[in-house]
Image (spheres, helix red, strand yellow):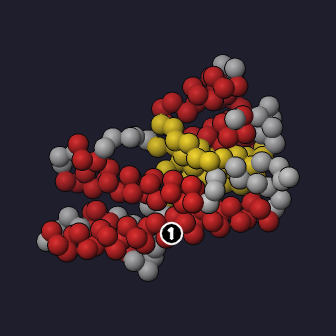
Amino acid sequence: MLPDAGIGIRMRTGRAICVVLIGGPEAPEVLCRRELRLWDPEVPETNQPFHAALELSPSEARRTIERASRAVRRAAERAFAGLRDELRSEGYASRAVGLVRVSDTDPATIRNPHMHAHAAESQLSYQALADAVASGGVRGFTLLESRVLGELASRLARPEVAIRRALAELGRSVGPPWRAEQRAACSAAWLCLAS
């Protein structure tokens, strides 16, 4: 049986920040850090499909969003399958993926068209990747970014300050960039190892 790799993914619109950890939850190591592209350069509106549709007639907007959504789903499937295959080729199994979102606001509750477009694109990117994880036979779970550190501290029975120091050390081991996005993805990957 292959050793586990914990995969943490911090969602963005059109892309996702991914950190993969190996080892035990007591002393994990960063195997890799990368960005997953969740849009198709051959279909430019897939980067921001709901923004692209803002100035179109309702029927054109619907067609644009449907076409772009299909392309986003295919891009997410390719991105996750590529990551999973790479881990397997390096001798690791991916059995759990932690998806970190900034917000879980329902886009239907947002009246401002521009803000609605942002929320709808975020939802599309998240759902496409969550579906890709599930269809890949990997267990996925979702956390809000504001709660991921507390959840990790609770699971490891360590104070949050100790977790922050450990995350900073993991970041130093791989170098920049190691911003909040990478730390959130790393926390989710660590939760996978601790599960």
Foreground of the two, 67 or 136: 136
50 on left or right of 69? left
Mark 1: amino acid: Ala
7 on left or right of 126? right
Q: In the rendered image, which residue does mark 1 sit on?
A: 75
Residue beneath the point at 66% across and 36% down: 191
Percent from the top left, x then y, of residue 194? 72, 34
From this view, report whether residue 186 is shown above or below residue 64: above
Residue beneath the point at 49% across and 50% down: 11
From this view, report whether residue 133 is shown above or below residue 184: below
Residue beneath the point at 71% across and 53% down: 94
105 on left or right of 131? left
* Residue at the outermost right position: 1
Residue 130 visible somewhere in the drawing: yes
Residue beneath the point at 63% across and 29% down: 152
User: Total label count?
Assistant: 1
Percent from the top left, x then y, of residue 155? 66, 26
